[in-house]
Amino acid sequence: MKRVSDTIRLVTALIASTFLVGALLGHTVATAAENTLTAAEAKVIAKQAYLYGFPMVMNYKTMWNYTIDSKSPDYKGPFNEMSCVARLFTPEDKAVVTPNTDTPYCMFWMDVRSEPLVLSVPEMEPDRFYHFQLVDLYTYNFAYVGTLTTGNDAGKFLIAGPDWNGEKPEGITDVIKSETGFVFNVTRTQLLGPDDLNKVKAIQASYGLQPLSDFLGKEAPAGAPQPNFPKWDEGSQFDERFFGYLDFMMGLLGSPGEGEGEKKLWDKLASIGIGTVGDFDFSALPAEMQEALKVGVKEGFSAIEKFVGATTKDPLVSGKIFGTRDFLTKSTKKNYKLDRTDMLRSAAAHTGLYGNSAAEAIYPTYIVDADGEPLDASKQNYTLTFEKDALPPVKAFWSVTMYDGKTQLFIDNPLDRYLLNSPSLEEYVRGEDGSLVFYISKESPGKDLEANWLPAPEGPFYLVMRLYGPEPEALSGDWSPPAVKKESSTATSSAESAAVADPIEIDSFQAIAMTTGKREITN
């Protein structure tokens, strides 16, 4: 990473709590007279830095593993090159926990500092859902291209950075601007069934990404200088090494964003040497300041976990903590009475980095039954009943997927069936009253009902319901997922039993951020 100059080291050593701030970034130059921090003050600022920067540091972790480190097992390719995978997961796949078979992915990073990129999408069948989720360095979902936003017609979309101010070129459908020069993308393309895999591969191959100069047939501008990307050290997001990565990410941003109080926060961070000219050097700080920053990290992470714990029983929480800067600013004030989006972004990054905005998808997750008891198919058979005209309200489609509670993977079963979903509605058996009952058990409910059987393991399990394009009633809570009941139970349905909006949102795409060993979690 960057290195603090010998002059700054000398001043820091002589003046225990004074930190020089670079005027070249527009911050006030601190002197011993102007900026003498106590350890207690430094700890408070360090905690604020952690809450502000945690999502960006987790974002960098993904950038490093996906784009910078070509030796990483998670490497996708260099900047501005698409990386797509279309496959059917089975119980033999153990690298990805809570796997998603609804929407195969393309994932890639874009560098739009020197010039915009043109994203080309083909015409899509009317009944197929797809989208490109565009995420900036802050982890805001700043835009989507896809079924629910731009439609299923073919189009060419200009993805531009904050410094581009050109006119929309001929042939471009729309211009989409990011407030950061680097953009992460997650593309989801609906898989309509096992026989549809080759079609999804063909669709992915027809997606295009090219520099604007190439699209226009002109000479490319000079490329932006390549940063000295620091090697990622796993675990550094939880200790004092965090500050070096935050310092680097603020360097990529260049200046404070438009959020309330963000300029003031940058000035505070500069007072402890973060976001200034020259690299942050933790080892150059006095011992009492080093300890203060370590404590600030611990208190910051503790605050995130406390916030997550307090919101896990809210089945709509995933719809409140992912979205655009404007959406999260409003959600912060309306839902949590906070002034800044930092806590929401941090909670989202910790529980579900790259979770979808609510208008695109939500993920109610079942971990207990209607009686509040953990789901366990070695002890009970269960049912999930949708009353007539009470199916999940969506613009696109929905699914219910089974996962082993111990391995978080798919379950080996005689039908090779891992989910039930709305594209297969015509195959299911309906009750005389028009209701739809899914049977959840380790043994088949019998041939007559086997179409409605979701095989469960001999032991604990959990279910994830994915709603793509949820209607307003699903987002407002006017519609709630029905409870999972013991097969003999007459318990009343309860939104609470449908649970804890997914811990990746459970299930938003968490890429590398939430891992168990080498395993990834996807949505």
Image (cartoon, helix red, strand yellow):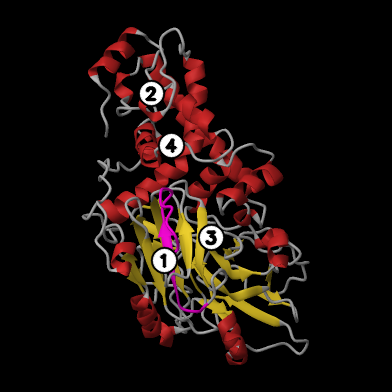
Mark drawn on residue 255: 4
Q: Secondary structure at mark 3?
A: loop
Mark drawn on residue 169: 1
Chain-order first, disc 1 or disc 2: 2
Q: Secondary structure at mark 2?
A: helix
> Which amino acid type is marked by label 1?
Pro
Chain-order first, disc 1 or disc 4: 1
Residue 478 percent location from the top left of the image: 76, 64
Mark drawn on residue 509: none
Residue at which label 3 appears: 356
Crowd around label 1: few <14 · some 14–19 · many ≥20 (10 Å)? few
Q: CA distance from mark 3 to mark 1?
A: 30 Å
Chain-order first, disc 3 or disc 4: 4
The reply to whether residue 128 is visible in this rendering is yes
Residue at which label 2 appears: 23
Chain-order first, disc 2 or disc 3: 2
